[in-house]
Image (cartoon, grey):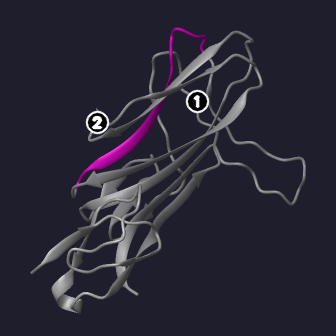
Amino acid sequence: MSLLRVQGAQERALVKVGEISNGIGLPTVEVDLESGGGGSYKIVSEELISAASFDSQQPADVDTPLQINFGAAQTTPQITLSAAGAITCVEAGQYNFRLRLQVGRQGNPSAAILFGRALINGTQAGPSFSTVLDDSDDVVPLTFESTVTMQVGDVLTVEIVRDSAGINEGGIFVESSTLSDWQDAPSSLLTITRSVVTAA
């Protein structure tokens, strides 16, 4: 079987031997050139999981990591999400993760320092992120996107920690509008997608 690796934007890509349309930022996928005899293909984004937590989540103390949850458990044939926030790979592949945390603090006016990280199988994957919260009413949405290659059984988790270089404050918070017909802003929001090649 002849396979061509294609990296392209989420629009139509003309796939021929020796000729592809290149894009930026999407994972490499495999196209079987023999089954369709070449021709036109498009790369689409397939949403697998969309989840949110409407509970404020705060570490118990400084230097004590807290695993973030994303609401109720969900299961798909490719990937599962536990109520504790563990994301487990069921089908090996590349997955696109979009994460938003509503980071904030309350109380003491001194500066709080909050760190976060992602782990695969208990080992940190990629650099940490951090923010300094120097106002007692700071609430800031932070958004992260990453493409991760996972094997069957791999478990991805996200942690936050209050660094002891700052005060014992900070976490992720739900925010509510005074308008009754507006939905709350969740403390954590997670979307998992994968890129799929289909015939045009």
Q: What residue type is labelled 1?
A: Gln
**Residue 58 picture quarter:** top right
Residue at the right extreme of this rendering: 179
Residue nearest the viewer, comparing 188 with 83? 188
The crowding category of the residue bearing disc 1, from other C-alpha atoms within 10 Å (few below 14, some 14 to 19, many at least 20), is many
The answer to which of 107 and 130 lies nearer the viewer is: 130
Q: What residue type is labelled 2?
A: Gly
Q: Whole-percent x and y of residue 84?
A: 45, 46
Name the residue that disc number 1 marks.
Answer: 58
**Residue 160 on the magenta span:** yes
What is the x, y in percent for residue 130?
52, 25
Q: Is residue 34 left or right of residue 106?
A: left
What residue sits 60% from the left and 14% below the top? 168
Q: In which quarter of the image is the C terminus?
A: bottom left
Which tag is nearer the camera, tag 1 or tag 2?
A: 2
155 to the left or right of 190: left
Residue 55 vertical placement versus 200 (above, below): above
State the residue at coordinates (71%, 48%).
185
**Label 2's element?**
loop
Q: Nearer the viewer, residue 131 or 199?
A: 199
Secondary structure found at label 1: loop
Extreme residue toward the front, this view: 19
Q: What percent of the width, then of the height, locates residue 105?
A: 68, 25
Where does label 2 land, which residue?
Answer: 122
Q: Distance between the residues labelled 1 and 2?
A: 20 Å
- Lower position in the chain sequence, tag 1 or tag 2: 1
Q: Which segment did they paint magenta?
A: 153-168
